[in-house]
Amino acid sequence: MKNKLILIALAFTTPTISAQSLSIEPGIFELYSTPHYTPDSSCDTGIKLTLDEGTITGPFAVLENFVAGFCEIYANPDQRIYILEKLADEPCGSKIYQGQRSTLEGTAKIEIVDHRGRRCRDSVPAKIIVKEEIDSNISLTFYSNGSLEPIRICTAVAGMLINPKNGECIVFTNGCQMAEMLEQGYVEPLDNQCQN
């Protein structure tokens, strides 16, 4: 029954052209209000996020409250469906998606930061970070369970970037090093600027 409701809700949405051509890595995640949360197996509450490619509508996200374990509490599922558009790619391989939906109070918005493909050595609080704005007064942030071990995939590329503090030309020898330098504000040299 739940899947039928999702399909009916998606049938009444109008995806944009960019949403139809966008792809997203599907997955189901348990989200919590704090990073690195350890679920309680006897009684646990959170938000379930489902990411799907949506062959007809384009990529979408479904948020739904959940209760797990042996606790005697009820959580209204409060299912929320967002059609997603890609907002940006970060230099380290993370992806940012956004979406919105109409509610009785106005417009609810979502931003999903997907760090599953992240290549840099820095630390991020979770594989998936979701910011949901219910209305202009309520904004909530949720983090997927489990930490993201930094993955280092460095392509063989070499070149030079300029240190903005002193104008010195610095050599990089791989793609990860180049991405880190660009994040620190290094810039590409102009013609003949780094030739000795």
Image: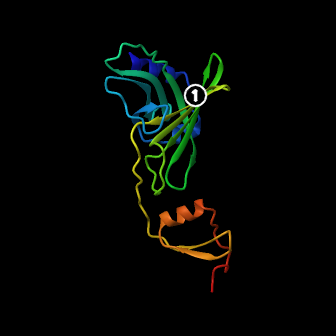
Q: Is residue 185 above or below residue 15?
A: below
Residue placed at 35% from the left, 16% from the top?
71
Q: 108 or 151, which is in the foreground?
A: 151
Residue 126 on image: x %, y %: 46, 42
Q: In the structure shown, which secondary structural element does the residue marked by tag 1 occupy? A: loop
Q: Is residue 60 above or below residue 119?
A: above
Tag count in the figure?
Answer: 1
**Image quadrant for the C terminus?**
bottom right
Q: Quadrant of residue 165?
A: bottom right
Residue 134 on image: x %, y %: 60, 25
Residue placed at 40% from the left, 55% from the top?
151
Q: Is residue 178 above or below residue 19?
A: below
Crowding near the residue tagged with mark 1, few <14, some 14–19, many ≥20 C-alpha atoms within 10 Å: few
Q: Quadrant of residue 99?
A: top right
Residue 9 on image: x %, y %: 50, 20
Residue placed at 59% from the left, 35% from the top?
16
Residue 147 on image: x %, y %: 40, 44
Q: 184 or 58, which is in the foreground?
A: 184
Q: 168 or 24, which is in the foreground?
A: 168
Where does label 1 land, which residue?
Answer: 14
The colouring scheme, among rainbow, by chain, secondary structure or one colour, is rainbow
Q: Quadrant of residue 6?
A: top left
